[in-house]
Image: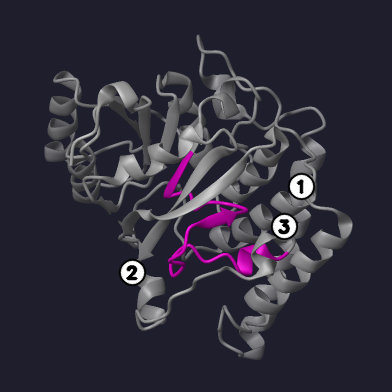
């Protein structure tokens, strides 16, 4: 299928990456095969030492101007997103992960919705191998439940893996989402670099602040991709199996809540977070071993205290440390602390 450049808004595809090799190259190959007439590819690479063959391939792609390749000496997913945005030219900015597979018409399904002025973002469907396997691959959802639009508990009800019907949603998945450029340049809403590690909930935090623009997020299941979910590498700088990851996981949830939610919404989220991730009740379905529950409870508590430390430090430090390192480029404004719930 071919699309006219005249009727197609310019798109910037931003791929943050960290410690990925063959999968990254395969992802880029898929992007370069997309049947869309007006797009650029920016690879924001936080890998310190690639395999020689990966370096050679990326350098060749950059030399032939098929991609823009940026090498960074730090690792932060929200920082990498902001870095790429500042160097992009597209009217629409699409974010994907470095371990995805795409159909050739992928960008068209994102671009077509921006003819509607109320649409400020598009969320795509994610064929997540692990989540599809857990459901046996047979679960389908038409209309998301009302809870999926409640900022306090939406994160346990919004399912962009199994949902097959287009509709408004409260957030997108970070591996498959797009935004109008003006969200960043005119409204001054940027990704908060205080979200650490795998940056879980950084896209949720951004989506909640995005609502200040008055625009909405449209979910299109046809704007789909396959997320491979590789166990190693990715967009973060710590292992998902580490103790640091466990604390960071809770820290990021609490940070999102304290920035964007009313007290009542926060309490609902804290309760659901405890019930699911600490006690292990559905949909988390974790081990009910008393020792593991106590251990997870300790991580939960440390994560909460760590968030208070982050918030206190933010009184004199806006936390956008990676953007401030980006010399010669206009840096982001301080992230908005509150959003209309």
Would you say the magenta stretch is mainly helix, strand or loop? loop
Q: Earlier in the sequence, mark 1 or mark 2?
A: 2
Q: Are marks 3 and 2 in contact (CB under 8 Å)?
A: no
Callout 3 crowding tier (Cα within 10 Å): few <14, some 14–19, many ≥20: many
| Outermost top residue | 328
Q: Secondary structure at mark 3?
A: loop
- Left or right side of 230 for 113: right
Residue 45 appears in the picture as rendered = no
- Position of residue 267 measured from the top left corner of the image (x, y, whole percent): 83, 65
Q: Residue, x 19% and y 20% (percent of image)?
A: 65
- Position of residue 157 measured from the top left corner of the image (x, y, whole percent): 61, 69
Q: Residue, x 37% and y 65% (percent of image)?
A: 128
Q: Are marks 1 and 3 in contact (CB under 8 Å)?
A: yes
Q: Residue, x 58% and y 63% (percent of image)?
A: 246
Numbered mark located on residue 129 in the image:
2
Numbered mark located on residue 281 in the image:
none
Q: Secondary structure at mark 2?
A: helix
Number of marks: 3
- Left or right side of 329 for 235: left
User: Is residue 66 highlighted in magenta?
Assistant: no
The residue tagged 3 is 151
Q: CA distance from mark 1 to mark 2?
A: 31 Å
Compared with 289, 58 (above or below) is above
The residue tagged 1 is 260
User: Is residue 165 highlighted in magenta?
Assistant: yes
Q: Which residues are magenta?
A: 153-178
């Amino acid at each position: 299928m071919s699309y006219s450049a005249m009727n197609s808004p310019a798109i910037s595809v931003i791929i943050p990456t960290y410690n990925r090799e063959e999968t990254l190259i395969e992802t880029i190959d898929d992007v370069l095969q997309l049947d869309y007439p007006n797009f650029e590819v920016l690879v924001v690479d936080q890998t310190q030492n690639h395999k020689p063959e990966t370096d050679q391939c990326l350098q060749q792609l950059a030399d032939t101007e098929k991609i823009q390749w940026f090498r960074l000496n730090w690792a932060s997913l929200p920082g990498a997103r902001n870095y790429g945005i500042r160097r992009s030219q597209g009217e629409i900015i699409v974010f994907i992960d470095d371990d995805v597979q795409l159909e050739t018409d992928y960008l068209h399904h994102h671009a077509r919705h921006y003819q509607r002025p109320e649409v400020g973002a598009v969320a795509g469907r994610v064929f997540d191998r692990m989540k599809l396997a857990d459901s046996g691959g047979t679960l389908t959802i038409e209309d998301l439940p009302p809870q999926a639009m409640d900022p306090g508990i939406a994160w346990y009800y919004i399912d962009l893996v199994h949902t097959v019907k287009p509709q408004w949603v409260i957030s997108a998945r970070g591996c498959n989402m797009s935004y109008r450029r003006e969200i960043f340049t005119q409204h001054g809403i940027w990704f908060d670099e205080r979200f650490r590690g795998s940056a879980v909930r950084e896209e949720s935090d951004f989506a909640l602040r995005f609502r200040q623009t008055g625009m909405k997020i449209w979910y299109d299941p046809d704007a789909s991709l396959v997320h491979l979910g590789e166990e190693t590498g990715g967009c973060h700088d710590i292992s998902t199996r580490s103790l640091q990851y466990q604390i960071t996981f809770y820290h990021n949830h609490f940070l999102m809540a304290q920035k964007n939610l009313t007290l009542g919404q926060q309490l609902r989220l804290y309760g659901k977070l405890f019930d699911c991730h600490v006690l292990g009740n559905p949909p988390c379905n974790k081990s009910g071993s008393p020792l593991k529950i106590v251990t997870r409870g300790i991580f939960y508590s440390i994560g909460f205290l760590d968030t208070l430390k982050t918030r206190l430090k933010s009184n004199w430090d806006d936390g956008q440390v990676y953007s401030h390192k980006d010399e010669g480029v206009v840096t982001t404004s301080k992230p908005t602390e509150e959003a209309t719930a």
